Amino acid sequence: MRLLEFNLDEGGANPQHLPAAQKQSKPPVTTPQKPTLAAARQRAKVFPVKTNTTRKPARRSPIDLEQLQQRIVALELRIQERVDRRGEQVPARELELLKQRIQLLERNVNSELWAAKQREYSMLQLLSKPTWQVRLRKQLMHFRKHKLPEIGNWLKTETHEWWQHSQPHWWPKFARAWQESLQQARR
């Protein structure tokens, strides 16, 4: 967007359209007056407006099932080592925290599997759709095999009906006279 320079002599209401040579030749007028609205606008900082306020959804990295199993085994080994070292049972609070962590990991795995199944289903749906050319070819074949004969039959009946209803009152006499002339010509 291009900013206009306003004429300060006329109160800043009219934009100046001066060539570059004239702009450089005139020295800027500095007066010790009160700052005007136009001068305040010139000194004001302009910040760009962000037009795209929507954020892209964060893509989660896929969960590595082998790594997850290794973490669970490592946690179980650490608990077993602590039990062996102390010779006593692990406090119930630590077991609850471990259960919560394992449940969280299971939920993450289940949600990842569900998301993968959804992606697979949507991709299969896209792949099962015929291409545009195949659909067009099918529609043209259907039109040629079914619609064209229907249109032809309809046109035939309509033209026959039109012929029957459009004949003028003199037509039967004309047809009879024509038949008689043909018979006379054959004799």
Image: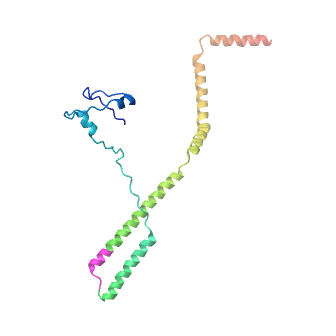
Task: Decide: is 73 above or below 30.
Answer: below
Q: In which quarter of the image is residue 114?
A: bottom left
Q: In this view, does 84 lie to the left or right of 61?
A: left
Q: In this view, does 120 lie to the left or right of 4?
A: right
Examine the structure image and report whether residue 95 is included in the region drawn in magenta: yes
Q: Nearer the viewer, residue 5 or 34?
A: 34
Q: In which quarter of the image is residue 155?
A: top right
Residue 158 on image: x %, y %: 58, 25
Residue 57 on image: x %, y %: 38, 54
Give the residue at x 53% y 49%.
Answer: 129
Give the residue at x 36% y 81%.
Answer: 78
Chief secondary structure of the magenta portion: helix
Image quarter where the C terminus lies is top right
Q: How many labels does the image show?
A: 0
Residue 128 on image: x %, y %: 53, 52
- What residue span does the magenta drawing correspond to? 89-98
